[in-house]
Amino acid sequence: MLQVRGLAKSFAGRPLLSGVDLAVAPGEWVAIVGESGSGKSTLLNLLAGLDRADAGTIVVDGKAIDPADDDATARWRRAHVGFVFQAFHLLPYLDVGTNVALPLALNGVPSRERAPRVHEMLSRVGLAGFEARRPATLSGGEMQRAAIARALVHGPRLVLADEPTGNLDEANASAVLDCLGEAVRHARAAALMVTHSPVAAARADRIVRLAGGRLA
């Protein structure tokens, strides 16, 4: 589902990523660990087409991604990438159902088709009946599960999670990781999770370490 070859990125003349190679199968969940400043979040941004690599190729579901074409990359990202953030990034003035439906609206899904898909996705993450709730009324774990629902509702082929349990206590973190793993495998998406937590990393199918600009 995801194939990365020779990915390189430098900042201010300092190499951060140097020839990163990675392959992730459909339904596989990979944890990326490494020291702060090793380039983990930069790697996620490159994979999402939010930044441009200096060299290398990224292929998702057989399609090579060219971030040099900003409009095409934005359309591809809306359709094929789901991003789960540490800080949730739910819009506080919208209810949960509307937050989760946003990727469907951006991808042109008719309004009559959104509600059943939102309901199904919220049920899958344990938030059935939460459509009318505002984010401010949710616990941290509930907000992160709503964010996972939003990231997966449009059926992305690539799921990227940046420290998804960083703001959660142990119990909520465990529940969120259960939810993320089940949802990714159900969708048969390729998933990468950046984390500093060895407990969170151990929940993935595979752990890779980013050090010296390369994955091992």
Image (cartoon, rainbow, N blue to C red):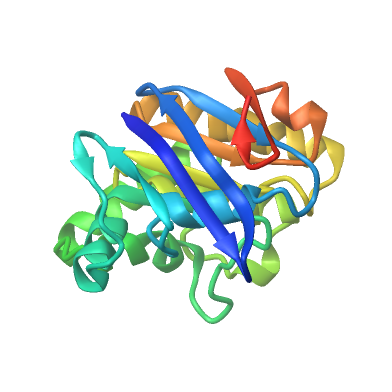
As drawn, the residue found furthest toward the top would be 205
User: Looking at the picture, how far across and down is residue 191, in whole percent?
Assistant: 47, 34
Q: Which residue is drawn at the image coordinates 34% and 26% (left, top)?
A: 188
Q: Say how many tags the image has.
A: 0
Q: Which residue is drawn at the image coordinates 17% and 60% (left, top)?
A: 109
Q: Which residue is drawn at the image coordinates 46% and 59% (left, top)?
A: 131
- Tell me the quarter of the picture where residue 196 sits: top right
Residue 73 visible (yes or no): yes
User: Looking at the picture, how far across and down is residue 142, in whole percent?
Assistant: 65, 51
Q: Which residue is drawn at the image coordinates 38% and 25% (left, top)?
A: 186
What quarter of the picture does the C terminus occupy?
A: top right
As drawn, the residue found furthest toward the right would be 169
User: Looking at the picture, how far across and down is residue 176, in whole percent?
Assistant: 66, 38
What quarter of the picture does the N terminus occupy?
A: top left
Please state which of residues 204 and 44 is positioned toward the viewer in this rendering: 44
Left or right of 38 in this view: 55: left
Please state which of residues 96 and 87 is positioned toward the viewer in this rendering: 87
Question: Above or below — where is 60 with respect to 47?
Answer: above
User: Looking at the picture, how far across and down is residue 111, in whole percent?
Assistant: 19, 66
